[in-house]
Amino acid sequence: MKQAIVVFNSGSTSLKFGAYAVDSDADPAALSLLCVGRIDSIEGDPHFFVKDAAGKSLAAHEWGEGHAIDHAVALQHVITWLATHLSEKTIVAAGHRVVLGAMRYDAPVRIDGEVLDYLDSLVAMEPSHQRLNIAGARAFAEAFPEVPQVACFDNSFHRTMPEVAQTYALPKEVRDAGVRHWGCHGISYDYISRQMPKFAPQARRVIVAHLGGGTSLCAMQGGRSVETTMGFSALSGLPMATRSGDIPPGALFYLLRSHRFDVAALEKMLYERAGLLGLSGISGDMRVLLGSADPQAIAAVAQFVYAMTKFIGAYTAVLGGLDALVFTAGIGENSAPLRAASCGQLAWLGVKLDEHANTAGGPRISAADSAVSVWVIPTDEELMIAQYTLALLGPC
Ligand code: ADP
């Protein structure tokens, strides 16, 4: 196994990456993990760590508290580390998570100058991640100009939503300009959808809760997305760590008109100071909030659970019932109390939690006689990106 695929997943405050060994028959299912790592808190207290497939630490680095870096420095650090660590292998491809392919791309695409220019043109639609996703592809191309790269889109998975779910009640010219229910977290949802037959092969009507720093729900029918809480941008739906979730448009006009915010300040507030952080005034980190007795922290968690309950009710109606509920991503995979609180609100659906299994982390956390099976399934966006990349490029 001399060939490797590398993958990049740039978030607003983190950069995740991985490398996979490619078997000579180039079967996407045959990818094996070489290493996976991340730089967290890029603009706060940046720290880099990477581990091998067995979870053993391969490297770690801290820049020191108060020593903020930017995404360009973070990318350079990761690319240099990968180049050194994989020096015995040939890097044959790079895959990138890109939030928006919008009107032109609804499936992974090989990156060239024209593709990058189009993706660049979408930054105004998706200001939080798109720019960083593209920067990753450009930085990698500078270091490895001969290596093919693939853009894998977070909204692709949601293109199966019925037209009625993808459309906003706006005039045609506005809809044609791309104001559409694009959705997000599709790479994660696709991964979970492919895992479902292993866990609950009979489940056709499924809601997956991707609860990380960004949070969303996806209603799936037969493994395909039919609804999702992220809308036009990554601001919609549930409250997130620091993003607001749904806010009535009238409130935004009011804030702009009352001169308390200009557009840039409003956008920054909605992305960086809202959500769990805004509600609690303490932290956007669910761990901190769950561990706090402060009434504001308790209220923020309650609001998060309330929003989930509301959407799960609506999506159960969309699906015509519910067979399975899946928790994934940082909060979904790790927080038994949050899962218990959410499931507690779903007793009317016949959801019965197995407390012991929930504390143990699953995979099945519902009681044997629960009308809806409930699961904890770890997501793996990096592996999914590597599989898309290999599937598109074929034998390298
Ligand atoms: P991202 O959304 O940034 O890609 P993750 O899916 O890893 O990242 O989710 C990160 C979030 O998961 C953080 O906001 C963190 O608070 C939360 N988290 C991680 N572990 C726990 C835990 N044990 N309990 C509650 N929240 C957790």
Image: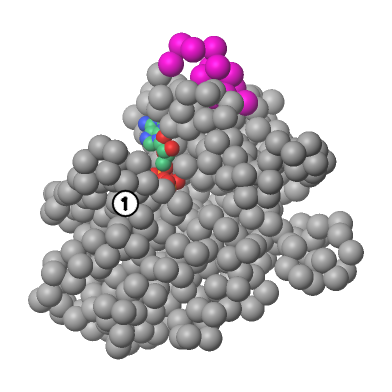
Residue that carries the numbered disc 1 in the rendered image: 69
Q: Main secondary structure of the magenta part?
A: helix
Amino acid on which the number 1 mark rests in the picture: Ile
Q: Position of residue 393 (x, y in %)?
A: 39, 84
Q: Is residue 295 magenta?
A: yes
Q: How is the image coloured?
A: one colour
In the image: residue 256, left or right of residue 368: right
In the image: residue 322, left or right of residue 91: right
Residue at 14% of width from left, 67% of height from top? 85
Magenta segment range? 292-303
Within the displayed image, which quadrant is ligand 1 positioned in?
top left
Residue 242 visible? The answer is yes
Residue at 78% of width from left, 36% of height from top? 258
Quadrant containing the C terminus in the rendered view: bottom left
Q: Is residue 357 magenta?
A: no
128 vs 134: above or below: above
Residue 368 visible? The answer is no
Q: Position of residue 217 (x, y in %)?
A: 60, 45
308 vs 15: above or below: above
Q: Secondary structure at mark 1?
A: loop
In the image: residue 301, left or right of residue 27: right
State the residue in front, 367 or 25.
Answer: 25
State the residue in front, 204 or 94.
Answer: 94
Q: Position of residue 50 (x, y in %)?
A: 21, 53
| Outermost left residue | 88
Residue at 24% of width from left, 50% of height from top? 48
118 vs 146: above or below: above
